[in-house]
Image (tube, rainbow, N blue to C red):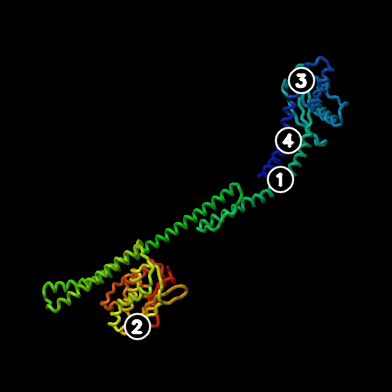
Amino acid sequence: MFAVFILGTLIIQSLFFERLYVSKKKGDLHEYVEKFKADYNKSASDEQSLQIIDEYELTYNMKILILDKSYILKGGTQISSKSRNDGFRVRELTDFVRQITTQYDNQQILSLGNSNKIYLINNKQAGTKAIVGISSNIQKQEIIFASSSLQPVNEALSVIEKIYLYFSIGAILFTILLAFIYSKMIAKPLLKINNAATKMAQLDFTEKCDVESDDEIGNVAASLNFLSENLHDALTSLRGANEQLEKDIEKERNLEKMRKEFVASVSHELKTPISLIDGYAVGLKDEIFEDADKDYYLDIIIDESKKMSNLVSDMLDLSHLESGLFKLSKEEFNITELINFTLRKYKGNMEERNIKLETSLIDDILVDADWDRMEQVLTNFITNAIKNVEDNGTIYVNMIEENGFISIEVENTGSSIPEDELPKVWDKFYKLDKSRNRKLGGTGIGLSIVKNILNLHGYVFGALNTEKGVKFYFSIPKYLQ
């Protein structure tokens, strides 16, 4: 734009400057002639008139000739006291006067009155230009001719055109250099901003605008980085909330599924004892049994009632443990004594089925745990082994010290559990053997209670198949106090 401005100025000056200058010179010459006429008419003598002519020629750089009504020179410029250039100007003026007087008579010129005529003369042979003004002096019946040269402005215009040309070339080069510099200063940051905005449109907020300037572009880059960080945080939070929502929905689905399975399992567990109690109670009421059989059927009713009570108790325990509000009553005790105490309770059941018991225990292992709940864990492991060991089989109860931990293992001989079923044994109401012996009970929630108790203690536990059968275990830190 700067280069266009300079070139435009040069063109306008070339086309219109001379016209404007000539127009101004004409106006000035008209003003000077009228002013001269007023002063000249006031002169009292010829000497005073010549003095006024000299003053105006010197002051306004003009030449003056005065003719009477017979076209006889009455007064005017003095050639002898002027330079050679003034001689040319006087001859131009006299030649012009001679040309005018041949075309018009004095009455025609005098008829101009107080108006003036301005002419532009161009001497192509001498390469000069001038303007000439004709004014009639009615008061003295004279004709005033005045000329002013235009040669200085032609020379000045030529010099100015050259200066503008050189200046325009320099301005164009300087403008190109500035354009290159500012394009680097502006275009490069804008490209970075555009790249970052494009990445943001693709939800990629890793791209940052590394623009450190303190101008508007730097402010835009900083605002874009701020927007990118906020959007990233918002989307991250939204993704997290969405993932959590999906987990909650999945959890609700699982809870609903578990609820249905729970209702079905509890109904199944309660159906048999309720049916037995109802049938035998009705039979006793109707006295359809002989006296010798009454005690037997009463024992069945009592036994089934205990099983129902145990099921309800287990469900309450599991619900309490899963609520997250259960608090352990920890105390320091010898875990080895607890294992021996629990094994003695089921010694009769094992002898009844000719089950062998082999133990390998470590004496005096102190733990800081809940005695009642750890007894519940051991009871479930042992009764589970008794229920699943084959007749005349063997149950192994071992304590193994390894890497600062004591592992307590209960292993029974017999059939292994399918590998895809192993993780399910900790689920509520899971039963691998649907036709197992009901004499030892079995609600299908024992191992689920074990899982929650061991989780509350922070112990590692698990189940795995071995060469002999199936092993359940849990590990406690050595000498935990």
Q: How far across and how far down the image is residue 351, in percent?
A: 29, 82
Alpha carbon distance from label 3 to label 4: 28 Å
Residues at discs 1 and 4 in contact (Cβ within 8 Å) = no
Q: Earlier in the sequence, mark 1 or mark 2?
A: 1
Alpha carbon distance from label 2 to label 4: 128 Å
Alpha carbon distance from label 2 to label 3: 151 Å
The image shows residue 114, relative to residue 331, as above or below, that is above
Under mark 3, the amino acid is Lys
Residues at discs 2 and 4 in contact (Cβ within 8 Å) = no
Q: Earlier in the sequence, mark 2 or mark 3?
A: 3
Which residue in the structure is indicated by mark 1?
A: 171
Relative to 394, 291 lies left or right: left
Under mark 1, the amino acid is Ala
Which residue in the structure is indicated by mark 4?
A: 18
Relative depth, front residue between 375 and 42:
375
Q: Is residue 222 visible?
A: yes
Under mark 2, the amino acid is Thr
Query: Mark 2 or 3, which is nearer the eye?
Result: 2
| Structural crowding at the residue carrying mark 4, measured as other residues with C-alpha within 10 Å and reported as few (<14), some (14–19) or many (≥20) | some
Who's the residue at 12% across and 77% down the image? 291
Q: How far across and how far down the image is residue 87, in percent?
A: 85, 29
Which residue in the structure is indicated by mark 2?
A: 394
Which residue in the structure is indicated by mark 3?
A: 37
Alpha carbon distance from label 3 to label 1: 50 Å
Query: Mark 1 or 4, which is nearer the eye?
Result: 1
Q: How far across and how far down the image is residue 55, in percent?
A: 81, 23
